[in-house]
Image (tube, coloured by chain):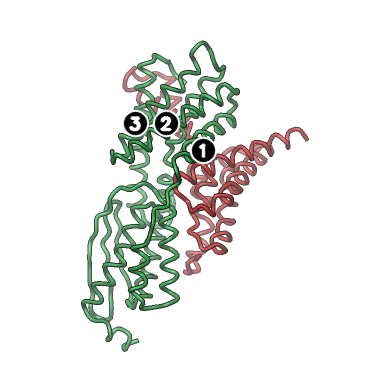
Amino acid sequence: MMVWFTLLLNAMWAAIPAVGFGMIFNVPRSTLPLCAVGGAFTYGLRDVLMHNHFSIELSTFIAATAIGIIGVFWSRRYVMPRPVYTVPSIIPMIPGTYAYEMMISLVSMNSDGVTDALLSSFIQNGLHAISILFAIAFGLVLPSMYYTKRKKPII
Amino acid sequence: MLKGFLTISYEEQTRITTVVVRVAVMLLEYGAESRLIEQLSSRLGVALGCTSIEISLIPSAIVLTTLIGDSSVTTTRRAHEQPINMSIVHQIVTICIAAEQSPRDIMMVERSLANIHANPYPGWFIVPMIGLSCAAFSHLQGADWPGFWITFLAASVGMMVRRALSSRNYSLLIVFAFTAFVCTLIASLAFYHDLSSTGRVVLSSSVLLLVPGLPYINSMLDAFKGYISMGWGRWTQATLLTLMSSLGIMLAMGLLDIKGW
């Protein structure tokens, strides 16, 4: 029970960055509540899946696909381009820390010389960042690939 | 069908071309994905009376041709770097849908395009909100409460610096490097007298406001949907931004002599 409460609380926390980044991208004001719902939903879904021993990449992929499909319905209903909802919603899952650590080990390899530790940190963080990013993007793309097949725009 | 394009003169076609390419360039500048740019401009062109629209995209320019019967008008426009603005993209989508509902009404489209407003969020609202966002990230990654508040402070000040530099039209790369530098300097307060026991989390979370999320996602979406060169261009841009932020962090860490995260 306690675990589920923590997961729910974390999902609430994830809603804040979704709104914040939505504001950086300057989404229309009326969409901010749905961005918050989307952020909480994706992060919560990913947490639940990871809690059930899925890998972080697979959980991210499933969560991104889910928000991609939900985004189609929201965008039809409110006549909005889909990225307005989907991109802020997946922001809490972006592997920002991995990407920064990869870049920093790259820069320090240049200044301090190549060591095994730096090299493995570079490769490990880089692979993590790229595979998570790939999972997010592929998840978001899947629903719109279906609509490409039908040759009919979503809105 | 034939009657439709006989009534459009060359001057009118040039006018339609100007409107359509303006829409396409605005979409590109304000961060829409390539498929949306192509779809919207061809839908708008058809609504205004063209037979079809052919468009070629590269990250910094657009080449666009309107075809009406046998006559074609081609034009090229350069796209300049603008901050991402989804509000403008939404307004353009609305205009295109309105144009489809009342076809051949170019006056209405021109008037609505002139009335597009950037609709920015006020500074007193966005600055603490971004601070809170990064603080929420640090909390999710397990920072303690002093660390939470230090992240809040660092990200808020970083956002103020970013807004101030952006409004003075500095290059986005410079803005990112300098903002990362300031964020890291403030976040290193966590190490001062051991204020927070989770200094590494504070350091990495306080720069998260600089993650170029939309360019990365856009580049992947473009590449997946067949716009390979646009995907590469946006990927390079996002990677450069990440690299510049990392340089700012490295500089601050070097100044303060912090070793590693």
- The chain letter of the green chain reads B
Element class at badge 3: helix
What label sits on residue B177 in the rendered view? 3
Would you place residue A115 above or below residue A128 in this image?
above
Name the quadrant containing residue B103.
bottom left
Question: Would residue A48 appear left or right of A155 to someone viewing this image?
Answer: right
What is the quadrant of the N terminus of chain B in the image? bottom left
Measured as percent of width and height from the top left, residue A144 is found at: 50, 59
- What residue is rendered at 46% in x and 23% in y? B187
Q: Label 2: which residue?
A: B158
Return the disc, 3 or 2, that comes first in the chain's sequence.
2
Q: Which residue matches tag 1?
A: B129
Give the foreground label among 3 and 2. Answer: 2
Q: Amino acid at mark 3?
A: Ala
Mark 3 and mark 2: span between their CA atoms? 11 Å
Subunit that carries the residue with mark 2: B
- Side (left or right) of B161 relative to B132: left
The three-letter amino acid code for the residue at tag 1 is Met
